[in-house]
Amino acid sequence: MRNLITDVPGVLVGNAQDRRAATGVTVAMFERSVAAGVITLGGAPGSRAVTLLEPEMGGLVDAIVLSGGSIYGLDAAGGVTAVLRAQGKGAQFGGIAIPVAVQAILFDLRNGGEKGWLAGPQPRQPPYWDLGRDAALAAAESFELGSAGAGLGATTATVKGGLGSASARTRQGFTIGALVAVNAVGAATFGSGGHFWAAPYERDGEFGGRGWPSTFPAEALALTMKGQPLPATATTIGMVATDAQLTKAECKRLAIMANDGLSKALRPVHAPNDGDTVFAAATGAAGPGGDPPVLTELGTVAADCLARAVARGVYEATALPYKDALPDWKARFGGVRA
């Protein structure tokens, strides 16, 4: 186990980023088309083709795209689709391959990067189609966490955000993995210290092994959000995947349960101007997993994995090289064990 979503057989992940623009794209590619579901609880989402994932709709999915760039980032799925077509993925209609790449976006347009397509009177092409293509071409079992892909330009209320992943196995032997780009309006840590909200779910010191403090500080529940002029330009987007065989309706239930992992790891979450969205995909390689007790455990483990992935994304991030950029967790708290 690599403690990555790619521990789920048939799932590969690729990153691509534009460091000058401080933005990027992350893509989960599936060996075969899969059943998937989605839940969006943020109040201002941006997405592509997610209606297709509703249980009453037909069709399977070939890739899930997480991107920076807000509405401009939706171009990324086009680049991913081009790679999928070249690989022969997708359903065939009249001899034409129609692969499906669904997508969610986060807001990283004001993090200090040079986003020239937002300036000037003439229309300019954002980089996301190319980034989507490059991320799809880079898909592999191993991939970078922290300030990479869709996590490159991500931030939280207190420290740099980033790309995180985690995995686990259920008692029935199913594998669950999570992937998340943490760009929260709130905080992944509480109080003035570096303790993660997700600490109870940590495994093997994957985000510092700090645990919770022996005395819970009074300031821990104080509301911490990104300050003006960006009080609500956020969004945490992610996904879980399993090798269990699930229907689209069961994937939807898995996404709903997994989404609780964001509430375990971030405070606040699902705010009015967030676009918080969580996908769930099932490759089916390990056999049926839709029996209610089995699906209940899958959802519980998925939520824990997503909470761990959030903390890992923040823990592994490095600060952007811009004036007034947020520090990363290791620079701010790494040498302090209080």
Image: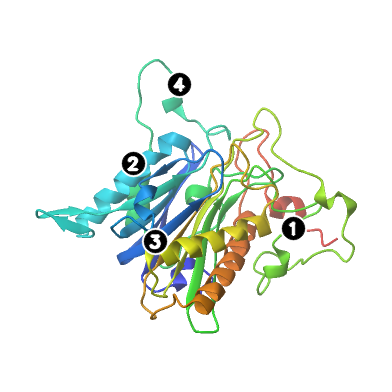
Which label belongs to residue 119?
4
The amino acid sitting under disc 4 is Ala
Q: Are marks 1 and 2 in contact (CB under 8 Å)?
A: no
Q: Which mark is residue 129?
A: 2
Give the residue drawn at x 35%, y 64%: 35
Instruction: Give the residue at mark 1.
Output: 334
- Whole-angstrom CA distance, mark 4 to mark 3, is 37 Å
Where residue 292 appears, as percent x and y from the top left, is: 50, 76
Q: Nearer the viewer, mark 1 or mark 3?
A: 3
- Vertical placement of residue 76 versus 58, above or below: above
Viewer-side label of 4, 3: 3
Position of 92 compared to 132: left or right?
A: left
Residue 32: where, in percent of width, then height?
29, 67
* Mark nearer the N terminus (4 vs 1): 4
Q: Are marks 3 and 2 in contact (CB under 8 Å)?
A: no
Q: Nearer the viewer, mark 3 or mark 2?
A: 3
Looking at the rendered structure, the kind of residue marked 1 is Gly
Marked residue nearer the N-terminal end (1 or 2): 2
Image quarter (top left, top right, bottom left or bottom right) of the C terminus: bottom right
Q: Nearer the viewer, residue 15 or 233?
A: 233
Q: Earlier in the sequence, mark 4 or mark 3?
A: 3
Q: Earlier in the sequence, mark 3 or mark 2?
A: 3
Q: Residue at x 70, y 29 (%)?
A: 228
Label annotation for residue 53: none
- Compute the Cα span from label 3 to label 2: 23 Å
The residue that label 3 is drawn on is 36
**How far apart in space, not on screen, are marks 1 and 2 (Cα)?**
36 Å
